[in-house]
Image (spheres, rainbow, N blue to C red):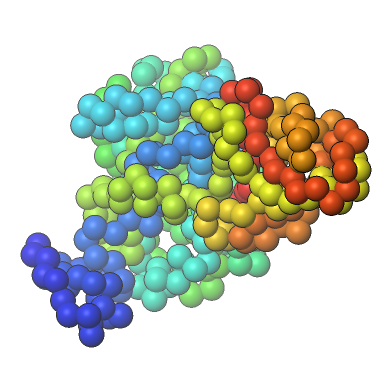
Amino acid sequence: MSVTKVSSAMQDLTDDYAFSGTVSGAGAPSHRNDIINGGLVVNQENQTAPADDAYTIGDLFLHVGEGTPVMSLETDGPQGTRPWQKMVLDANDQGGLVYFMSNDDVQDYIANGKLSFGIQLKTTAATISNARIGILKWVGTADAVTSDVVGTWASDGTNPTLATSWSYENTPANIGLTTSFARHTVEDVTVDSNTKNIAIFVWTDDGTITASDVIGFSEWQCNPGATVHAFSSPSKDEVMNQVDYYLMRYSLNDNSFQTLAVGHQSTTTNAKLTMHLRREMRNGGTVTSSAAATWTVHSGNVAAAPSSIVAFNALGRYGFNIDMTVASRTQGWAANLYRTSSSTTFIQMDSRL
C-alpha cells in the first residue's frame, strides 16, 4: 500500500493522507481497528480481582463470570512481547471479557452492514479445552447498556442466556484452545439497522475448569466488512488519549507537589477546588479517589491533609469541583490540592458504558 501526502485543500476529505490499496467496506481502511486499546498498552486502573460485572485489566474490558478471577497484564504474548490479559479462573466457574462499542462507533457498522472480529487466545491447562466468541446487539437506549450481558449462565457447551435487550448476532460455537497463542476469528456478521450498541463477548464455559486454570486474551481486532484485518493499533500516546475519553485516572506516585486542583477557602473549614481534565470525556461520569489523608490542601501559609472529602460535584466532560473539609483557615484564601508523600494517591473519572 502506498501513502501520498495530499494538498491542504483535500485534508477535510482525506485526513491529510491519501491511501492506495484495498478498502474493506464503508469507512474501513485496512489498518482500522475499532477496539480501543486492543493491544493492551494502557492499564491505568489495574483492577486485578474483578467481581462479576466489573472492569479489569486494559481499562475498557469488563469481566463477567460466576467467580472472582485473578487478572494480570503479562508481556510475553504474541510475537513474544505483545501484552496479554491473564485470567486465572476459579474451579468450574464460567467467565470471560466483554468490550462495548459506543453508539457513535456503531454507525459505520450499520452503514456497512457487516462486522468482523479476531483475537489471540490460549490456555495453560488441558482442562480448559475451548472458548466461545459472541457478537452481541443492544436494542435498548443507546449507550445505556446493561453491562452484565449474561442473564443466566448455562451448562457446559450451551451459550448463556443474555440479559434483556441483548441478543447474539452470530451463533457462538466451541473454539479449541492450546497452550500457545492462536488467532480465532468471527467474520461477516450481519449488523442490523436497529442496533444501538455492540458488545464483543469472549468467554470459556468449559465445565471441567479447575482452580488456577488460565485463559489468555491478546490482540483484540474489530472492523467493518466481511473479513477481519490483521491486528493493528495506534501509538501508545494516541491509545492513551482514546482511553481517556472513557476512563481518566491520575496516579500521583512520583511528585509530592504536583498541583491537581485549584480554588479557594469558601469558609474557614471548607475548601472548594476545581479540577480541569487533560481532555474532554464522554460525559460527567463518576469520580473516585484515594482517602483524604493522601492529599494536601495548601491555602495561605498552611499545608495539611483535609479531614474529609465532602463531595465531588458539578461533574462535567471537562472537569469537576471538589469540596474538602480542612482545619481552620482564613476564608477567601486561594487554595490548591496536591498529594502527600503517599504512593497510593489517585483520582479517577469514569464514563465507561
- Decide: is 273 above or below 49: below
Most foreground residue, 148 or 128: 148
**Where residue 299 sits: x, y (%)?**
76, 40
**Is 158 in front, or is 153?**
153
Q: Nearer the viewer, residue 213 or 11?
A: 11
Q: Indicate the position of residue 147 as horizontal and vertical percent values.
A: 62, 49
| As drawn, 21 above or below 13 | above
In the picture, measured across the screen, residue 13 lies left or right of residue 86, that is left
Q: Residue furthest top?
A: 211
Q: List the single residue furthest toward the front.
A: 301
Quadrant assignment, res 298:
top right
User: Which residue is pictured at 44% across the width and 52% down the height?
Assistant: 241
- Which residue: 38% across, 17% down? 125
**With 129 as the anchor, is 311 left or right in this view?**
right
Rendering quarter of residue 214: top left
Placement of 74 over or under 6, stated as above or below: above
**159 relative position to 346: left or right:** left
Q: Residue at x 57, y 58 (%)?
A: 281
Determine if residue 156 is in view. no
Near-viewer residue (292 or 157): 292
Quadrant showing the N terminus: bottom left
The C terminus sits in image quarter: bottom right
Q: What is the total number of numbered labels drawn onto the structure image?
A: 0
